Image: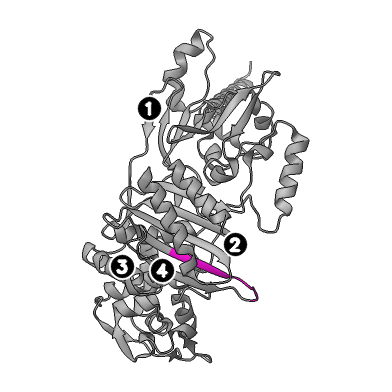
Amino acid sequence: MKPGVDRAVGRTWVITLVLVVALMANITYVQGFDAQNLRDDPNNARQFEDRFKIDRGPIVADGERLAWSEKTGHDRYQRHYKDGPVFAPVTGYFSVFSQTGLESAENHFLDGTDDRLATTNLVDKLIGKHVPGGTVETTVNADAQRAAYDALRSAGVRRAAAVALDARTGAILAMASTPSYDPNDVSTLDRKKATAAFDRLNDEPLKPLLDKATNEVFPPGSTFKTVVVASALKAGASETTRVRAGRSYRPPGAGQAINNDAGDIGGSCDLSRIPLIEAYAQSCNTTFAFMGAEEPGNDAVHAQAERFGFGDRIEYADGLHAAASSFPKTGEASLSALGSIGQGNTVASPLQMAMVAAAIANDGVIMRPHLVDRLRAPSGTTVDRIEPKRMSEALTGEQAGQLLDMMKAVVARGTGKSLRGTSILGGKTGTADVEGAAYNDRWFIGVGPKDEPKYAVAVMTEAPGYGAESGPIAAKIIDALERG
């Protein structure tokens, strides 16, 4: 060959070799490193074709199977759910189209493809033995979950949710929501039946498929005053500091004044200055509107809300995030004042407000909430355990102790005095007006039991009335936890 031709052929071989190496590298990456992501891609229809041919492992609470698979006569496995509407916010569903809740968060552990199961399942696979998926053990107290759901459902309310946390570890002990749904209806192998069930549920105005405990936010009413009090303590106040009260307060530049509840007329909220603990116990709107608008002001309240977790989509299981709670960062005093009494642009999830209460019961430290306790191989061997993780420090221990005193005062002589004699040590009521609606968002956050406040509870119910009416539900949940 001529020299010029030799060079051209040589270049062609080099380019061909580079392309072959690049192709092999890409194939290696796709098959070895990105295969799982491609299988899980929502645009990959093939992931749904064989999903019921897998013997998924169970989801468990207190030794009870909440979700499990049973083989049908067609070499397929049907998913079943115990007390489906009760535990739906925990388990989610596993359908021909998708999965939610722990069915989604621990999908690959349940179907046996998780890397943590590779070694434990290897021998059985080599000898051709049937290998089911792994077991997911939740943090949920089954009796408390049932108590929460039954109390919410029997309350005759529009929508409702409750969350209970172990304040020391962040473990989610109960997470109930109503109206709920039965995962058995949507987890059928029959596509037509599943589609009909989804259509029916999605057409319902109160959206039962949407977990109200974590995935919806509501105006928290006066329970948010707990965050405002914390900002005042951070700024140097104490529970005995005398603060502004009075029947009415007009923020700077506002066209309309903020007033106390009509039931406060003639009480301590009418006085010009009262101790901070009394303002909190009696839930004086004018005190906390002034704090949010002027002293310590919007920046301080916003910063304190962030310490509690506001603004973050809190992850409580792998890939499961709560809707973000929020308090407005604003230079308009009227907006900050309204937000500081839990109205206006302030919204929170029941999980978030349970975290606020938990910080107070845990010396100011917030533990990251988690729904999974441990993961077990089909043999029963524990392959992973979720250890408690510190999330943030919202308050010092001394400040948390003062706030706990204030929550005790709410139950002893304040807006939550109807809970005296129950398992609630301390708490905060909250009633948020819903514009144009005949109902209120009625809140209660609390800690208990009385001898050792290790549980934190948040309850939200929608109905006419006041936040104190959600308090007995919180007490029932703590009672169930104590029995367990």
The disc label shown at residue 408, or none: 3
The secondary element bearing badge 4 is classed as: helix
| Other-residue count near label 3 (Cα within 10 Å), few / some / many at <14 / 14–19 / ≥20 | many
Label 1 sits on what residue type?
A: Thr
Q: Which mark is in front, 2 or 4?
A: 4
The disc label shown at residue 418, or none: 4
Q: Which mark is in front, 4 or 3?
A: 4
The secondary element bearing badge 3 is classed as: helix
Q: Residue furthest top?
A: 127
The x and y percentages for residue 167 are 33, 53
Q: Which mark is in front, 3 or 1?
A: 3
Label 4 sits on what residue type?
A: Ser
* Residue, disc 1: 382
Residue range (magenta): 436-444
Q: CA distance from mark 2 to mark 4?
A: 20 Å
Q: Are marks 2 and 1 in contact (CB under 8 Å)?
A: no
Instruction: State the residue at coordinates (34%, 83%).
Output: 295
Residue 443 falls within the magenta-colored stretch: yes
The secondary element bearing badge 1 is classed as: strand
The x and y percentages for residue 204 are 71, 55
* Depicted 437 relative to depicted 143: above or below: below
* Residue, disc 2: 157
Q: Are marks 2 and 3 in contact (CB under 8 Å)?
A: no
